[in-house]
Image: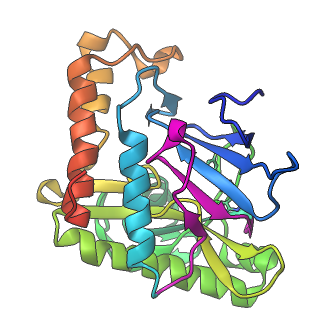
Amino acid sequence: MTNPLGLEGFQHVYSGKVRDLYAPLGPDGAPVPDRLMLVASDRISAYDWVLDTPIPDKGAVLTRLSLWWFDQLADLVPNHVVSTDVPAAVAGRAVIVRRLEMLKLEAIARAYLTGGGLEEYRAKGSVCGVPLPEGLEDGSRLPEPVFTPTTKAPVGEHDLPMSPAEVEELVGADVAAEVSRLTRAILARGNEIAAERGILIADTKVEFGRAADGSGGLVLGDEVLTPDSSRFWPAAAWQPGRSQPSYDKQFVRDWLTSPESGWSRSSGEAPPPLPERVVEQTRAKYVEAYELLTGETF
Ligand SMILES: Nc1ncnc(-c2cnn(Cc3cccc(F)c3)c2)c1Cl
């Protein structure tokens, strides 16, 4: 794939649904060994589709939010952030990071039960081998965050739940315990801060790596506590026993499932472009979440 953004001095490494990864090139034209650039696009995904219509400033808002969280969490865990000195084409929505050897697992913690975790609970009364109290419903708050890791499935396949034993087999008992402790602590800290500001973070996915030279401990990579890596719910609308509205994606979901869109999920067809008002409403929710959480003006 050629360099989609035409970023001089960077080699395109990988494109996710809504983010892209680049390797900075050194003066000799070879990739700088221990650096990467993470670029957040304005793309939005819904119902497992990447929509045609971008949400202006989404990439910039989520990048600034993630950087703010890394700072809030710096006493808990070191992170991979190096600088925001990036090319003009991606200014404000890209970060230069230390290249890590990423653990091959999605470190997920849940403070509220929903989605895949709820399905597993309904089937087994537990999630990822952790027994939970009886009588929990969709959206129930858990007594404390639960670590529910999954595999990092290849593109197009589904991530699979991992038992504690499988995590230990993959990374060893000590690292497994540390990943669990840190992931739960990150979500707990996130909810301490967010709940005061009207946002519930139901669950979150973080990624850890180790420095390439093997020195030091775990480093928090990727993005942290954004509405793309986590479920954000408006606290005022929280009502266990039903599906909770999404803080940021509800306008998109409601329009796509309304008769006005002319689309149906079961059709297997790509969703139609979003109307301007839905784009604007969604942009406003990202800006609102950022400003509520950080106290800063976007
Ligand atoms: N510091 C790091 N060192 C090595 N690898 C990574 C890494 C690889 N993949 N991802 C997920 C991802 C982040 C952004 C854009 C994408 F397309 C994919 C993160 C990181 Cl963050």
Name the quadrant containing residue 16. top right
Whether residue 234 is visible to the viewer of this picture, yes or no, is: no
Instruction: Write the start and end of the magenta stretch as one range.
Output: 76-103
- Residue 171 in picture, x, y percent from top left: 77, 78
Q: Is residue 193 magenta?
A: no
Q: Residue at x 75, y 76 (%)?
A: 211
14 over 107 or under it: above or below: above
> 95 left or right of 110?
right
> 47 left or right of 188?
right
Nearest the viewer among 134 and 110 is 110
- Residue 107 in picture, x, y percent from top left: 58, 68
- Residue 48 in picture, x, y percent from top left: 51, 34
Q: Is residue 97 magenta?
A: yes
Q: Residue at x 56, y 81 (%)?
A: 78
Q: Residue at x 53, y 17 (%)?
A: 268
Q: Residue at x 47, y 63 (%)?
A: 224
User: In the rendered picture of this protein, how many numbered marks are placed on residues?
Assistant: 0
Nearest the viewer among 1 and 218 is 1
Whether residue 298 is visible to the viewer of this picture, yes or no, is: yes
115 over 181 or under it: above or below: above
Name the quadrant containing residue 160. bottom right
> 76 left or right of 291?
right
State which quarter of the image contains the N terminus. Answer: top right
